[in-house]
Amino acid sequence: MNHSVPCRVKDLGLINYEEAFQLQKQTVSKVLQGQPNTLYLCEHLPVFTLGRLADERNFLIPPKDIESRGMKIFPIDRGGEVTLHGPGQIVTYPIFNLNHFRRDLKHFLYKLEQVAIDLLQDFDIVARRISGQRGVWVKEEKIASLGIGVKKWVSFHGMAINVNTDLNLFSMIKPCGLDVKMTSLSKLIGHNADLKDIKEKIIKHYCRNFNLTIEDQ
């Protein structure tokens, strides 16, 4: 992949999950019709999403009790298990035509993980992959989760990075079906991070890892 790939970038801010999901589906159709790749960044109101492999036994409290607290549970068409999205977590949705990126899903997921690893390196935090798992860890705690869908070689869904996330919300589930403790950037650096700065860094790392050229909307 020697040539740069045009990409539009849009920050959706704090948006409910259903609205962002519909926008992704619309954008997949546009990319399939030849429009540029698009990268969305956003935060979500608290929601638990269930991937295609999700098992309700990975809820640690009854789902009806979660919903009684005003949080939604949303089955979706991505890979993976149950995960949480909430304010302070930066979610990135790359709607990319994978014909531009080797048509190799493992390579694509590896590059997504590298974006998170590079972001943490900006804060002198050493992050890593774990063999046989998807996502990014700092020591034994998970900080970024991945799950994608693909339609005719166009990707959707993506990656969630815990920045200023309320980690207590993860106590309701086994994140990604694992007995794992979650962490966040704010926990690691001892204070809340500037989300605008984090988003700018994430875009920079996407551009470098995927050789993107940002297009005007």
Image (tube, rainbow, N blue to C red):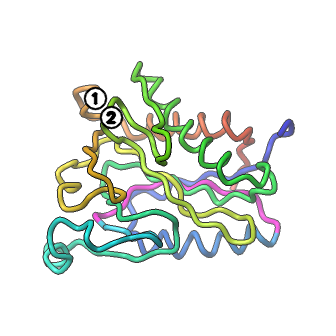
Name the magenta segment's main secondary structure.
strand
Residue 8 point in image, percent of width and height: 68, 53
Is residue 171 a member of the stretch shown in magenta?
A: no
Is residue 36 a member of the stretch shown in magenta?
A: yes
Bounds of the magenta segment: 34-46
- At label 1, which amino acid type do we have? Leu
Residue 67 point in image, percent of width and height: 20, 77
- Considering depth in this image, is 52 or 120 the residue closer to the camera? 52
Q: Is residue 55 left or right of residue 111?
A: left
- Considering depth in this image, is 192 or 145 the residue closer to the camera? 145
- Tell me the SS state at disc 1: helix
Q: Looking at this rendering, what residue extends furthest in the top direction?
A: 124
Q: Residue 58 shows which numbered tag? A: none
Q: Residue 185 shows which numbered tag? A: 2
Label 2 Cα neighbours within 10 Å, binned few <14 / some 14-19 / many ≥20: many
Residue 175 point in image, percent of width and height: 31, 56
- At label 2, which amino acid type do we have? Leu
Q: Is residue 116 left or right of residue 107?
A: left
Snapshot quadrant of residue 177: bottom left
Q: Which residue is mark 1?
A: 188
- Considering depth in this image, is 18 or 63 the residue closer to the camera? 63
Residue 92 point in image, percent of width and height: 51, 52
